[in-house]
Amino acid sequence: MPNWMTNFALILFILLVFTGLVTLADKLLFSKRRAEGEAEPWWIEYPKSFFPVILIVFMLRSFLVEPFKIPSSSMRPTLEVGDFILVNKFTYGIRLPIIEKKIVEINQPQRGDVLVFRYPQDPTLDYIKRVVGTPGDEVTYKDKKLTINGQSAPQKADGTYSYVEGTLAFVTTQRFVETFGDKPHTVANLPDAPPVSVGRVRAFPGRENCVYNESGFTCKVPAGQYFMMGDNRDNSEDSRYWGFVPDDHIRGKAFFVWWNWDDVSSFAFKRIGSGIR
């Protein structure tokens, strides 16, 4: 997803500094020069009025929750195109605003968590995927089946799942409920698609930790990094193709769908207020 949110955060920070400086200057200097009962000039009144609002929004976005929009089909059927989601910013630690540097460690991402993170090959972009491998894990995806450290992630058939890709293509997939520990989630597979398109695999840091063939791949996840996959397994550009996600690229955990603007159907409205699992 395009990282316009980072630009917005920077703009918000600049507005916060500007309105804060005007508020402080008025308190220390300008207010003492005004005659008793004299109205504040507009260039003081407006910044002072907006400062507390901007401060609250900036603090909420920086340390608590941040909104994102789902632009692609890679996380279907869990997340639909047009979903507006909320991301918990403090689940995994407290990070400095703008530069996203972690200063307080709280929790570590777990298998099955849905994360928003900065795309390793272009950190100006934000991606959203599911954690399938944590540091030290051996992840194997063979014949459309996931195995973590030699243990299969159980899959239960759950009918079919259909959606429209773009404006013309109608796609029908097989749907499964996959479970990591006690965390079930849905995934979609195209029966005739390969588990990995080897020709699309790029060079990436830690590439030597992976072995690819036509039936799938095995990757050993390096320390401090994570292996991500989309739930729409055959329509997802993920760690299979561009590698591992460093911990310092993680922006937060997706937990809530608060709106869907893709259409005005009853289906879209039913998604509003749903949790993300």
Image (tube, rainbow, N blue to C red):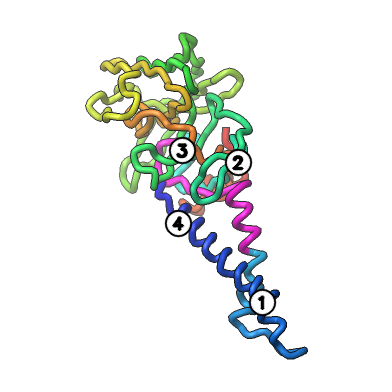
From the image, tell me which residue sits under label 4: 7
From the image, tell me which residue sits under label 1: 26
Image location (x, y in percent) of residue 58: 60, 56
Q: Amino acid at mark 2?
A: Ile
Q: Secondary structure at mark 1?
A: helix
Which mark is on residue 94?
2
Between 185 and 164, the one nearer to me in the picture: 185
- Give the residue drawn at x 49%, y 37%: 250
Tell me how far mark 3 sits from mark 2, CA to CA: 13 Å
Q: Earlier in the sequence, mark 1 or mark 3?
A: 1
Tell me how far mark 2 sits from mark 1, CA to CA: 33 Å
Front label number (4 vs 2)? 2
Image location (x, y in percent) of residue 182: 61, 20
Q: Looking at this view, name the residue that lies furthest to the right.
A: 36
Q: Is residue 16 magenta?
A: no
Quarter that holds the C terminus: top right
Front label number (1 vs 4)? 1
From the image, tell me which residue sits under label 3: 249
Q: Is residue 101 left or right of residue 205?
A: right
- Give the residue drawn at x 33%, y 28%: 205
Q: Amino acid at mark 3?
A: His
Image location (x, y in percent) of residue 118: 43, 41
Q: Secondary structure at mark 4?
A: helix
26 is higher (above) or lower (below) than 20: below
